Image: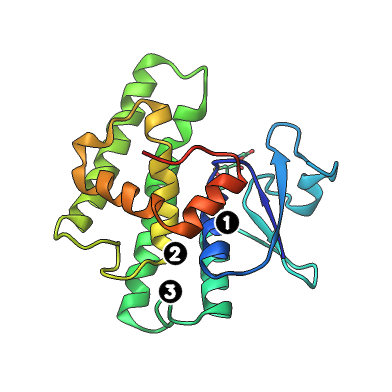
Amino acid sequence: MKLYYSPGACSLSPHIVLRELGLPATLEAVDLKTKRTDSGADFAALNPKGYVPALQLDDGEVLTEGVAIVQYLADRHAPGTLAPAAGTVERARLAAHLNFISAELHKAFGPLFNPALAPEARQAALATIGRKLDVMEQTLADGRPYLLGPGFSVADAYLFVILTWADPMGIDLARWPHLQQFRQRVASRPAVQSAMAAEGLQQAA
Ligand SMILES: N[C@@H](CCC(=O)N[C@@H](CS)C(=O)NCC(=O)O)C(=O)O
């Protein structure tokens, strides 16, 4: 397998899952501006969506969309560990978390990556992000270590990656103490540390 990624981008989520599962994969960095990979390949030809992550399987099949990739990896390689079995209420809860993180939280960060964003638009984006983080904080408020309870799941990998964007974007997680502790907890996992080191990233606070 080959994971197309950009350091610190949302592709870090499937990267973490690959390492959590102990799966061998090669990494190929993508320049998101030029759509060229490190080896000079045309990434847009491989993934017409033009964004990371993309996972190329050994038979050449290319999977896109982070939430699809992480569920495929968990189901295919370690059923019932990082993703509960299909058809269970627990799996529906996982899907709800993944969808919320992708469609609500991840999307809400989008405007902040625009260096030309007007100050009022930035304030509006920060307010939206704050409301989404409130929801995640509420989920962890009963003291559970991970989103589904005691066990780490693919949703935790994705939420963690989004939380690593908070500091660089000037968002102080101290306002959400359970999320702050969650970020530390996930950052201490060996698979997370090795994925971040492989992408040349500093460990999250
Ligand atoms: N819906 C996609 C969104 C992926 C996405 O937003 N990727 C960003 C990095 S976090 C990217 O590659 N942006 C560059 C671009 O869209 O050109 C997913 O969840 O996989």
Residue 33, horizontal then vertical, whole percent: 70, 31
Residue that protrudes farthest toward the right in the picture: 40
Q: Secondary structure at mark 3?
A: loop
Q: Residue 45 location, x and y as percent?
A: 81, 49
Indicate which quadrant contains ligand 1. Answer: top right
* Label number found at residue 83: 3
Q: Is residue 101 visible?
A: no
Residue toward you, 166 or 201: 201
Category of crowding for the residue at label 2, using alpha-carbon neighbours closer than 10 angstroms: few (below 14), some (14–19), many (at least 20):
many
Q: CA distance from mark 1 to mark 3?
A: 16 Å
Q: Relative to residue 182, is residue 69 drawn left or right?
A: right
Count of marks placed on residues: 3
Q: Residue 143, can we see it?
A: yes
Label 3 CA crowd tier, 10 Å (few <14, some 14–19, many 20+): many
The residue tagged 2 is: 154
| In this view, 150 is above or below 112 | below
Q: Nearer the viewer, mark 1 or mark 3?
A: 1
Residue placed under numbered mark 1 in the picture: 15
Q: What is the crowding at mark 1: few (fewer than 14 residues within 10 Å), some, or many (at least 20)?
A: many
Instruction: Return the disc, 1 or 3, that comes first in the chain's sequence.
Output: 1
Q: Name the residue type under label 1.
A: His
> Residue at horizontal 34%, vertical 17%?
120
**Residue 75 place in picture, x, y as percent:** 52, 78
Image quadrant containing the N terminus: bottom right
Going from the N terminus, do you reach mark 2 or mark 1 first? Answer: 1
